[in-house]
């Protein structure tokens, strides 16, 4: 239902902005020796699929399990829409399952298999992980902790 809500009047980031940010982050990861070049290059290639011509929906922008309230098998609320904008529904689904590929089948079943593109979700996993690594490193977080961004990138190989 979230993605069926009326579009907010403000646009999200354009594909060009996303691609430019991705290029800069990949260059930083390689130049600073944070990750092996082949790992970054392969995930950059996978991330290309996220730059597909999606139809904009109301996108949460930071959809994660802690932002979703559930009672039984019903979603009763979604909070923290501070990053909401027009965007790709697959980005939200990727954010919700990042680091938890084993839950992807459950998500697809609940969302509706016909509306889900698994290749694009995996592309967003790579894109989001590549794009977040520098910020995490610079702010004292460890993207190499089990289940975190670097594990997501290695799993894509």
Image: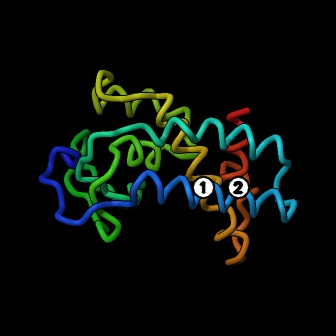
The numbered dot on residue 22 is: 1
Residue 123's spot in the image, x, y percent?
A: 54, 38
Rendered image: mark on residue 91: none
- Which residue is outermost to the top? 114
Give the residue at the far left of this rendering: 6
Left or right: 28 in relation to 59? right
Of helix, strand and loop, which one carries label 2?
Answer: helix
Q: Is residue 133 above or below residue 52?
A: below
**Outermost residue toward the bottom?**
139
Q: Residues within 10 Å of mark 1 (few under 14, many from 20)?
A: many
Q: Residues within 10 Å of mark 2 (few under 14, many from 20)?
A: many
Q: Is residue 73 above or below residue 132?
A: above
Disc 2 to disc 1, C-alpha distance = 6 Å
* Residue beneath disc 2: 26
The count of marks equals: 2
CB atoms at circles 2 and 1 under 8 Å apart?
yes
| Residue closest to the eye, 23 or 138 | 23
Q: Residue at x 39, y 56 (%)?
A: 14
Decide: is 47 above or below 82.
above
Task: Determine whether the residue tagged by mark 1 lies in a helix, strand or loop.
Answer: helix
Which image quadrant is residue 109 in? top left
Q: Residue at x 67, y 61 (%)?
A: 25
């Amino acid at each position: 239902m979230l993605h069926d809500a009326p579009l907010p009047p403000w646009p999200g980031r354009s594909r060009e902005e996303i691609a430019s940010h991705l290029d800069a982050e990949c260059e930083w990861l390689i130049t600073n020796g944070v990750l092996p070049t082949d790992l970054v290059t392969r995930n950059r290639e996978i991330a290309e699929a996220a730059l597909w011509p999606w139809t904009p929906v109301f996108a949460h922008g930071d959809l994660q399990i802690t932002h979703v309230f559930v009672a039984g098998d019903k979603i009763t609320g979604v909070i923290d829409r501070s990053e909401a904008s027009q965007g790709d529904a697959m980005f939200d689904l990727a954010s919700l399952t990042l680091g938890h590929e084993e839950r992807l089948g459950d998500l697809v079943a609940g969302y509706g298999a016909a509306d889900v593109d698994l290749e694009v979700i995996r592309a967003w996993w790579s894109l989001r992980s590549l794009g977040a690594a520098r910020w995490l490193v610079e702010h004292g977080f460890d993207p190499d902790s089990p289940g975190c961004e670097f594990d997501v990138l290695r799993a894509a190989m």
